[in-house]
Amino acid sequence: MQRSKTRTAREPRLNFRPPARLDLWAITLSISIVAGTIAPPLAMALILASVVVCAGALLWRDLVPQGWRPMAVLLPLFTIAGAGIAYVHATTPDPLAELAAVEPGEVIIVGKVASPPTPVSYGYMADVRVEHLWYDGHEILRGGGVEVFAGDLNLGVGDRIRVDGEISLPDSSGGDFDYGRYLATKRISAVVNATYVRPMGGKGWIGQVHRRTDVALGYGLHPDEVAVVRGMVLGDRSLIPEELDTAFQRSGITHVLAISGQHVAVLAAMIYFLLRALAVPVMIRSPLTLGLIWLYILIAGVPPSALRAGVVATFVLAAPIFNRQLAPLHFMTTMLAAVLAYNPLLIYNSGFQLSVAAVFGILLLRKPIQALLKSTLFRPFAKPPETVSNLLAISLSAQVATTPIIAATFDQVSVIGVLTNLIAVPISGPILTLGLLGVIAGNVAPFLAYPINACNGFLVTILEFTARGASAMPFATVATPGISLPLIGLFFLGCVPAAIAEFSFPEERWPLWAALLLAWTTGWLLLIGATNG
């Protein structure tokens, strides 16, 4: 009896602290990294502001809610860490760039091909990771990356080559597009105009996989279909005809051709459920799935969107192992912080920008937009079709969130993409799945891929027909040349009420905020048109 009384008396002491909210740590770190990369003085201002908030939280206990006080107190730690990461990346010496800046003339490089050779106006270009660099008969540095331009590059990813040519810094005088900064997002410091290229022996295994993939997809698919599936499976769009590539852009479905989170998700689901069907224990199933996913990302060339998706997949699959649950918004911000800490210059990569904007748009805007659709478009239905309304809401959410980035990057925005994505998104999953299965079967024996590819060809034909048909319509796109950073910021500022609607307003108000969001998007595009008119 005495022990029971003692236990009862001590129980309240176990709950003497309220829950601590640290939800904002990752977004704070990410914002500091971005600020430190784009404008270091802004990072210093963020640090000073965080110190003021921290001091206020310590001295005035009612300044922030009790649960958020730890976050407020730790705010300077995260802002300083983010600014420090950006500073370390910015100040790390780059001997290769320093050499290219003096334009020494011809150098000799031995390295490995890091990307599939892509056709250009006068030959091919490919990324090469430098192992050795000689100048004037002496090896002067190792490491780094260069973009090689040559008349012929009959090579594969991972092949070891020797390149003789003149090294220089990338030409960044091409107007709004900073080519040097774009290459820096891929950790490439210089360009080499090759006069001589020779394989050094030893074919890279990634290149061999690419070659076998081309052979496998050739069984049962027409050349245009091979190019589309190859782009979806390997992320290499170099074989897609220019006319077809333009059609995909104008129709608003070019995203299905790039390695994205969908690709990683489809592959992860295939592997995971296959292993589960084989009764593989979860402690083995999740690590094995992760290993194969990262192997695929490596084969695809580690594009930024796939890197982001790989980090997300790692969190999702690792959570059950550690008996944890994940809040989607929290682990997405954690992913963003992890990827930016790895390479802050990815903020200048349009593919990364589009991927991040689309994901956060879906997370923050989907429910309000779906509520609007149910109260308007699907109102006549006694029971609104959940799958259709959800698919349309996802398409709208992603398109709204990526509108300013697409407008600034491509100087046009597809307005028909909302409809074309209703076709493209559902069939892109089966196309990718069959493409992956065809590649796997073809790597075992090419003829095994034929029946899989034959089935896939029908779906690819539908995708191509959708792209060409939609792009031919005169109202398919809106021209948006010359978008400035303040206009992009203005757009996202106008999206804030709808983005916080799920957390700040009652559910019956969600359709109103979603309607205002769509009106704001339309008004912003009209403003851009008027500004450029």
Image: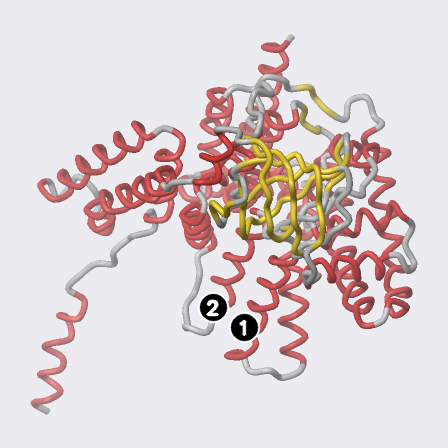
Residue 116, position in %: x, y? Answer: 70, 48
Q: Quadrant of the C terminus?
A: top right
Q: Where is mark 2, residue-wise?
A: 318
Residue 72, position in %: x, y? Answer: 22, 44
Q: Where is mark 1, residue-wise?
A: 286
Say if residue 382 shows up in the picture: no
Rendered position, 389 above or below 447: above
Instruction: Please tell me which residue lies in front, 175 or 294.
Output: 175
Secondary structure category for the residue under label 1: helix
Q: Are marks 2 and 1 in contact (CB under 8 Å)?
A: yes
Q: How is the image coloured?
A: secondary structure
Residue at (41%, 73%) from the top-left corner? 323
Residue at (23%, 46%) from the top-left corner? 77
Rendered position, 177 above or below 296: above
Specify whether 271 is left or right of 63. Answer: right
Q: CA distance from mark 2 to mark 1?
A: 7 Å
Instruction: Please tell me which residue lies in front, 477 or 354.
Output: 354
Quadrant of residue 503 in the image? top left
Instruction: Please tell me which residue lies in front, 509 or 255.
Output: 255
Residue 329, position in %: x, y? Answer: 45, 50
**Neighbour class for label 2 at 10 Å: few (<14), some, many (≥20)?**
some
Q: Which amino acid does the dot numbered 2 rest on?
A: Ala
